[in-house]
Structure formats: C-alpha cells, structure tokens
Amino acid sequence: MLERGAIVVIKFGSSTLVKTPGNTVNEANFASIVHSIEDLHQAGINVVIVSSGAVALGRRQLSALADKVDITSKQVLATIGQHHLMALWSSAFAQVSTLCGQVLVTKAELSSRTANLNVRDTLQAMLNAGVVPIVNENDSVAVDEIRYGDNDSLAAQVALAIGAAGVVLWTDVSGMYTGNPRIDTAARLVESLSASELEQFRKCVGGPGTHLGTGGMVTKLDAASLAATGGIWTRIVGCAPLDALMAVIAGEYPSTLVTPTVALQDGRTRWILANPGDGRIICNVGAADWIIRKGASLLAVGVVDVKGAFVRGDIVRIYNGETHIATGIARYDAYEVKQISGCREADIEQVLGYTAGPVVIHRDDLALL
Ligand code: GLU
C-alpha cells in the first residue's frame, strides 16, 4: 500500500488526544502514536500529522470559556491550547529522539497558488530534515466564512498540496457503516469503496462528531472525496491499536478504504480541484462534450449561464446541467461571462467594449473530474 519514500497524512481528532470528561491529556495515545511513527520511519514512510486538540486543551485551562462554542471564544481557546498541544507532541517525540515542528495554515493560504507551493515546500523540507510536521488550522485567525472548521478536510488539503499517497483519518469508530452503528445493530462496516460510490453512501451516514471535535462521518467522506479528486486514497479507521499504525495502514484492522478512480494528478491540477470558489459556469451539451472527451477549452459560445460571483483568475466549477464536469481558472469576471454567454469571438468586443479572446477557461487551466 505504501512504498518507501511515500508520504502519508494522518489526522488525529481531539477525542483521540484529549479525554472526556475534563479535557485531560490522553498521554498514552500520544506515546503510542509516536512509536508507530517511528516504525513508519523505519519502513521509509514519511508522515505528516494533522492534529486537532487546540480548542479542547484550551477549555481545560480557561474555565471561563470552557463551555463556549462561538467562534471568538474558540479562537481564544485555540491561542491557549495550540502551544500546549505542541508541547505535548514535542515531549512525546522527544521520547523517540525525533523532532517535530508546528505548521499552522488557513484556507486562504492553501487556496492561493503561491502560498500553497510555500506550504508544500516547507512540509517537504521538514520531511527531508527528518522533522515530523504537526499541522493544524490557524484557528486563532481563521474567521468563520473562510475556515475549514474540521481537520478532516484540512488533512485532505494538506495531502493534495504535498502530493501524499494517502490520508488516514483516525476516528472513534472502525470506519464507515451502512447505518449508525451506535443505534443500528444491523449496520455493517463498508471495508472498501471507490470514490465514485461515495455519494450514495453519503446519504446513509450522518450525525455530528463527538462533543470535542467538529467532524462526523460526513466530513470524513467529503475529505475522502476531495483527496480522491487528486488521486489520493483515504483510510477511515479507529478502534484499532494506535501503536500499530503500520498494520492499520496496510488494512490489517477493520476500516474503510476509499480508493480514487484516477492516478495521482500533477500539483497544479490538484490545487485547482481542491480550491474552487462559489462561482459556477453552466455550459451547453456540445461544450461539455468537447471538454470531457477532448479536454478542450471552454469558449464563450458554449456558455449558457453563470452563478455566483468571481473575478478573472478565480477558480470556478463548470457544470453541464446539474453535473459538475470540470474546474478551472476563469479568464473573465462573472458578470462579463454572463454578458458574453453564447457569443461568438467576433461579437465579444462589441458586447464588452474590449476582448480577452473567446476562451472563458483555457484548457491549460482546466482540471477534469
Ligand atoms: N482545529 C481545531 C482544534 O485544533 C479542531 C478542528 C476539528 O475538530 O477537526 O481544536
């Protein structure tokens, strides 16, 4: 499953690292994890950890905000908990004479191409130097509208940025079930599925995460779907020994493996697929056919409608009816695309007063789904 030199991103949620009630540190789990990571290092596998726990640890220390769930309180709790979290990782890794380092990112950074490359380069350089990256969202500055909120999607984003082979989402159940295993005794563990089957399963799982973390199974499936667009597998697992992560990754314990339907995509394509804004361009059947079969550019003449706001240079989704067929970088603003929708090249200048050509999304800036 993992060759020497491969990178795996492993996400641990708050409920694995912090005990309830009381938000005390689960020291045994920290110790087990670092021993597992040593084994993975011995096998030549590079590990990036995505660690939650900042907010939960902050709750223990600042009792005045212990029960607060509003964003500002969580930001304050994260400022207290994040450095405590890192101290815990540092002392756990010190037991195996390994250094770890903190990498805090926000959605705004990973969606900018330049910053995304900087994050990738930093993570790669840390791995080259034998330092284990411990990534978390920069909760203290990430505002509600532009934050990941759950570290499942952050783990997928980090995997896409660095071109990891796989993502492990550690949780408190064995994986994805056909129903809620806590209340439905007939619920069955789905051991393996392809990314194309995710949507049908998404309907039968649900419910919030634990009271400590924010992720439930839905966020895990969304993260797996995101990773799969770039050609990266995801293993959703829990209820397995944390000191045997190598065997867990190899599938020797009950878990759910989501396999991608495409090979690992190049870095720029992964970035485009991972960071669409809210804008959508709806194209006609003919244009969709050219895009899907020939990887052709989207021309103004093939555009039927535009939804949402975007500016030139933003990443937008292309739809054929209700079907998302591709994602790419727009060459015109949303209102301009709307004005020139259906226009042939010769008419664009007259409609807009200028022209940037007939191409709305160039084939070089297009990532097919
Ligand atoms: N970033 C948050 C923290 O460290 C956790 C997000 C999540 O629950 O996934 O507390």
Image (cartoon, rainbow, N blue to C red):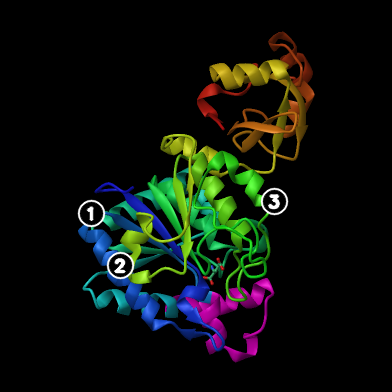
Q: Can residue 122 be seen in this view?
A: no
Q: Nearer the viewer, mark 1 or mark 3?
A: 3
Outermost residue, front side: 186
- Callout 1: SS: loop
Ligand 1 resides in the quarter of the picture at bottom right
- Residue 36 numbered mark, or none: 2
- Callout 3: SS: loop
Q: Position of residue 40 (x, y in %)?
A: 27, 60
Q: How far apart are marks 3 and 2 (CA)?
A: 34 Å
Q: Distance between the residues labelled 1 and 3?
A: 38 Å
Q: Residues within 10 Å of mark 1 (few under 14, many from 20)?
A: some
Residue at disc 3, CB closer than 8 Å to ligand 1: no
**Most common secondary structure along the magenta stretch:** helix
- Residue 44 numbered mark, or none: 1
Residue at disc 2, CB closer than 8 Å to ligand 1: no
- Residue 1 numbered mark, or none: none
Q: Residues within 10 Å of mark 3 (few under 14, many from 20)?
A: few
Q: Quadrant of the C terminus?
A: top right
Mark toward the start of the polypeptide (1 vs 3): 1
- Tell me which segment is drawn in magenta: 55-83
User: Is residue 54 found inside the magenta-colored segment of the image?
Assistant: no
* Residue 317, quarter of the rendered image: top right
At x 34%, y 63%, the residue is: 245
